[in-house]
Structures are given as C-alpha cells and as structure tokens.
Amino acid sequence: MQVRAGGFLCAENWQQLHMALCCGSNGVLAVWSCEIRIGPYTSAMTIRPDSIRQRPLPYADCLQQRSPADIELVVIHATELPDLAMARDYGKRIHYPDSGTGNSGHFYIDRDGSIEQWVAVDRVAHHVAGHNANSLGIELVNLGRYPHWLDSRHQHWQEQLTEAQIEALIGLLRRLQAKLPKLRCIAGHDELDQREVKASDDPDLRVRRKLDPGPGFPWSRVVEGSGLARLRNC
C-alpha cells in the first residue's frame, strides 16, 4: 500500500483502503485529495471531513438511540420532490405523535453533490418500513414521479441523478463503511418496500408505493465504488 497526499493511494482491497484513509503515520487523517487504485480500478476522490453540513431535524434527539455497531445496511432513496427545501419541509412533519417524530433519511445529497446530515447515525430514523433499526437512509434529491406519485399514467422517472450526486454518494458510502464495523450491505427503497396501492386516477388499478432510487440508478458503479454488496448477495 502507498499513501501520498496529492498523489496515489494503492491498496489490494477495501480493508487496506479504509486503514489508509483513517490512519496516517500519526493516527490522523492526512490524505485530502488523491487518486485511488484498487486492483484494476482507479477513481478520483476528494476527502473532506468537514464537507457534510450538519442540520439536525427538530425532533432528532427524540428518535430512538442505538449503537452504530448495529448498523449493517444502507438504504438508498430518492426524495421524489423538486428540491432540498421541500424535502426538509416533509422531513420536519410529525407523523408519530407519541414520540413527536417524523419520516426522514439520515443523509441528503443535493444535485450539486452537497451533503447534509439530518439525523445522527446513532439514532433510528423512520425511512423504510421494517428495516429501520439496523440501517441508514440516504436520500438523493430527485423529482421521481412528482407530483403524481400514485397516478398510473405518470409512473415514469423524470430525471437521472447528476454526476455530482453519484460521486458524492460513493464517497459517503466509503466513509460510512470505514466507520461502521458491520456495514456490508446496500439496497434500494424499492427492494424493501414492494407494497402496491390503489392508483390515484383509477381505483381499479394498482401502482407501487416506492420506486426509488429509480430505474436508472447506477447500481454496478455504486457497488463497485463503495465496496458494499447488494442486499440479496449479503
């Protein structure tokens, strides 16, 4: 393995990569911008520990606590909304009066690649039915089917992710995997919630509640870049 700031980082596997990123010769992260080579793959990567904007939701401290060591899965979502501001409005809404909490992911990635964290990883966010306790939710700002989510005539995905979002997502996944010892798996929201409901335009038809992160999501690239495995292969 070779580590040189502004130069090359070479590792035989992801475990060596994580060690290189997390520990310098004095135990301090010292690699800020480098080229990563793992086996035959090469990818540009910028490491900025301060690049994630912290914006805790008002109820974040009311969410159930957990140990980060229990996190095994990352779930990828799409907001299916026009912008981050509207996603924030939805995230702040209270859906569970007993706890005073709502639905949200842990991290949000905007179209320009900027990342915000709304819920700490040691809190259980409500983002996917039946899998919240051991997972993290990452939301990608994307129109999806907005505003006709359940209309059978409007089930096409309106936009693809930006290159900046994909690069930011892969970088975030690498950082999370380096910090969370049991994190090994990744899934789309649509894989975990396959329920169907009556179409809003015709009650005799049924549509999927969740299609995110969308039909064009670059799974091969994200899996290869992050080192995580699809849930069905875990």
Image (cartoon, grey):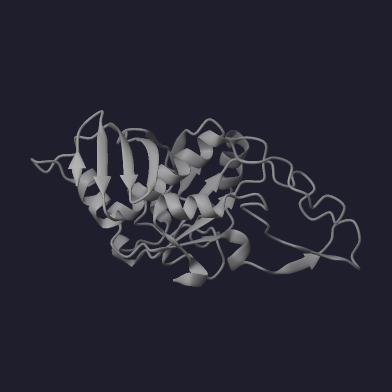
At horizontal 21% and vertical 51% (from top left) the residue drawn is 19
Indicate the quadrant where residue 118 lies. top left
Left or right position of 120 against 211: left
At horizontal 33% and vertical 51% (from top left) the residue drawn is 39
Left or right position of 160 against 101: right
Left or right position of 158 against 47: right
Q: Is residue 230 above or below residue 201?
A: below
Q: Is residue 161 above or below residue 132?
A: above
Residue 147 place in picture, x, y as percent: 77, 44
Q: Of residues 17 and 199, which is closer to you in this image?
A: 17
Tally of numbered discs: 0
Query: Residue 102, can we see it?
Result: no
Query: In the picture, which quadrant includes the C terminus?
Result: bottom left
Q: Of residues 162 and 194, which is closer to you in this image?
A: 162
Q: Farthest residue to the left: give it.
A: 26
At horizontal 58% and vertical 36% (from top left) the residue drawn is 162
Residue 6 place in picture, x, y as percent: 26, 28
Residue 187 place in picture, x, y as percent: 52, 61
Indicate the quadrant where residue 194 lies. bottom right
At horizontal 19% and vertical 47% (from top left) the residue drawn is 1
Residue 14 place in picture, x, y as percent: 30, 55
Query: Residue 25, can we see it?
Result: yes
Q: Farthest residue to the front: give it.
A: 40
